[in-house]
Image: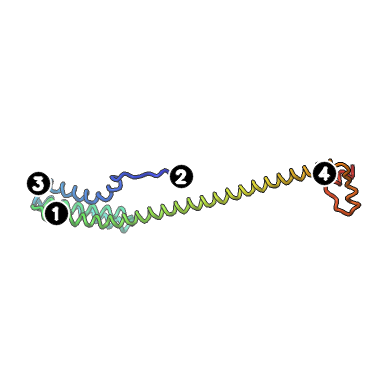
Amino acid sequence: MNEPIVARHWLALAAPKAAPALATTTVLALARIWNANGAEHSVGNAVLMGALSLGAAAAGVVAGNSTGDSVLVGTAFAASGSLAFAGVAGYADGMPLPLLLWSLATTGAYALGARYWRTDRRETLAHQRDITDRREERAHVERIETLRATTQVEVARTGAAYAEQLAAALVHRAALPGFDPTALERAGLPELAASKGEAKS
């Protein structure tokens, strides 16, 4: 019932928060490398990236209309935006426009990520509350069952002790000198349970 407490490493906690910035920075760096290797002012490369970006966006629209899977739709649109960003960053001859697009893409990624992080945090807190409530309920039931079992044991012990004392009293009474059960009957006292057997004998 006692589950081990696992403390996550700070890198594991920070990795999801750093992922959007790492992704957009990687795309920018690769696009600038591509720019230096012949993509600058290359219409063919720009058309290729534009076509790929439009294809990814169309795939996102189709996925949204047919399956409604938010993860698939989000992935398709993220790929479309990344391809468009890479195309512009590779085509442009200076750094201001690619940096502007990088800042916009990073901000947008964090804005979308914050929504999912809030949802995940809410679900995690709700799950932890549910587990805590269940543990408290089980502990309460266990305490009640323990009290009930203890009470039953004590009642059984009391009954056994009473039976032993009663048997000892009957044996002691029968061993008294001059004890006559019929004399009790003549006096009008109620007959004791053990005296019936003794009177018949």
Give me the disc on residue 36: 3
| Amino acid type, residue under disc 2 in the picture | Asn
**Is residue 1 visible to us here?**
yes
Q: CA distance from mark 2 to mark 3?
A: 59 Å
Q: Quadrant of residue 96?
A: bottom left
Give me the disc on residue 2: 2
- How crowded pointer 3 is (Cα within 10 Å; few <14, some 14-19, many 20+) is rated as few
Q: Position of residue 24 (x, y in %)?
A: 20, 51
Badge 1 element: helix
Q: Position of residue 124 (x, y in %)?
A: 38, 53
Q: CA distance from mark 2 to mark 4?
A: 58 Å
Residue that sits furthest to the front in the current view? 177
Q: Quadrant of residue 122?
A: bottom left
Q: Position of residue 86 (x, y in %)?
A: 16, 51
Give me the disc on residue 173: 4
Q: CA distance from mark 3 to mark 4?
A: 116 Å
